[in-house]
Image: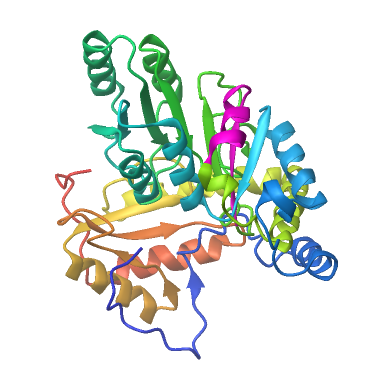
Amino acid sequence: MAAAGSPPLPPSRPLIDFSSNDYLGLATDGALVEAAAAALGRDGVGAGAAALISGHRPVHRRLEQALARWLGRDQVLLFPSGFQANVALLTCLADRHSVVLADRLIHHSLLLGVRASGARLRRFRHNDCTDLGRQLDQLRADAPRRRLLVLSESLFSMEGTSPDLSALVQCCQAAAALLILDEAHGLGVLGCRGRGLAHGQPGVHAVVGTFGKAFGSGGACIAADAPLGDYLLQFSGGYRYSTALAPPLAAAALAALERMPALEAERVSLLRRSVELRDGLVALGWPRPPGDGPVLALKLGSAAAALQLQEALRQEGLLAWAIRPPSVPRGESRLRLVLRRGHTEADLGRLLTALEATAVAPPSHSLKP
C-alpha cells in the first residue's frame, strides 16, 4: 500500500513485524501447512478450470459448507482474491440504472467494481449514517423503483475504524437499499467469535471475506442468503469465467476455519492489546488512533514525516510501513501499525519506547482525524 521508492530493508537484520495482516499468525501454522501440503499432493497446484466446469473439488465444497454454517448464510462462493470478489459482486448486482452509495474511504476494488458496472457512484462521509440517510432519502424520493446499493467495510484497513452497522442497516432498510459489507479485515477478528460484524445482522445482504488476512491463506468468498446467493451463482461472470481457487489454498482456509474456536482467547487478547496500545500512544502525546481493532493509524500529514518515522523505527528493529499518496489522500500520510497474535507485551513496550525516543514529534491534536 505504500508508494514506490520506499528504502530497502537490510536482509540480514530481523525486524519485529508491525505491518502484516496475518492477524492470528496462521500463515505459518502447522495445521494450515499440513492441510495445504496434503491438498497439493492430492489435487495438484491449481484447479485447472472454472468452478462450474471441473475446477470445483471436494475441498471447495467442504469449505463452502463450513463457511456458510459459520457465517449463518445460505450460500458461499469462493474466489481467487478479494479484489476479484468485490469486482464480481458489483458488476453482477449493479448496472447503469443503479446508484451505489459508498463510504468515501471504501477499498479501491469496490470502486473499480462500481465503475465496471456502469452504475452512478455517490460518496457519503466516512462512517456517517446521517449523511448516508439524507442521500438515500433524496434518491428514493426522486426514483422510487431505482436499485440502490450501499457499500461499507467492517474494518477500514488504512484507518482502523469500523461503522455503526446497526445504524447502517436501519438506513438501508428505510430506503430499500442493498447493503454490502466488505469484511476482508474483520473476519477472524471482529464480531461474535470472530465471525465478523455482519454475523446475526439480517439486513446485510452480502458479505465479502478474504482468506489472506486472519485466515493466513489466500483467496476470498462472497456469502449471502438465498435467493441472492443463487443469483450470484448463476449470473456472476467473475465467478463463472474464472479458474477456481487453488485447492491447497482452499484446504488451508478450511484448516484455519477449524482452528478458530481454539483461538478465541487469543483473538480477545489481540483486541485488548489493541486498546492498550492506543492508551500507550495517548500517554506519549499522540492523538488516539480511531477505532478499537488491531489496525492503528498514526497520522502525520506529510509523506516525509511518515517516511522519517518508518526509518526511525526500522533502526530500532521494528517494521512499520509509511502509507502515503496515492494510497491515502495528499496531506494524510501515516504510519500504519498492525497488531498480530504473537506480539508480546515486550514487543509493544519496545514499540512505545522507540516512538518516545524518535525525533518525529506527535502531530497536533488539531490534525484532521
x then y, percent, for residue 134: 23, 16
User: Which quadrant is home to the C terminus?
Assistant: top left
| Residue 184 showing in the rendered view | no
The structure's colour scheme is rainbow
x then y, percent, for residue 92: 46, 35
Read off the magenta span: 219-236
Res 125 quadrant in image: top left
Q: Is residue 32 left or right of residue 102?
A: right
Residue ID at (51%, 24%):
204
User: Viewer-proximal residue, 218 or 159?
Assistant: 218
Residue ID at (57%, 54%):
242
Q: Is residue 184 left or right of residue 109?
A: right
User: Viewer-proximal residue, 304 or 244?
Assistant: 244
Res 130 quadrant in image: top left
1 inside magenta stretch:
no
User: Viewer-proximal residue, 72 or 21?
Assistant: 72
Residue ID at (57%, 57%):
212
| Residue 254 showing in the rendered view | yes
Q: How many marks?
A: 0
x then y, percent, for residue 83: 46, 52
x then y, percent, for residue 2: 32, 67
User: Which quadrant is home to the N terminus?
Assistant: bottom left
- Rendered view: 349 above or below 227: below
- Rendered view: 260 above or below 235: below
226 inside magenta stretch:
yes
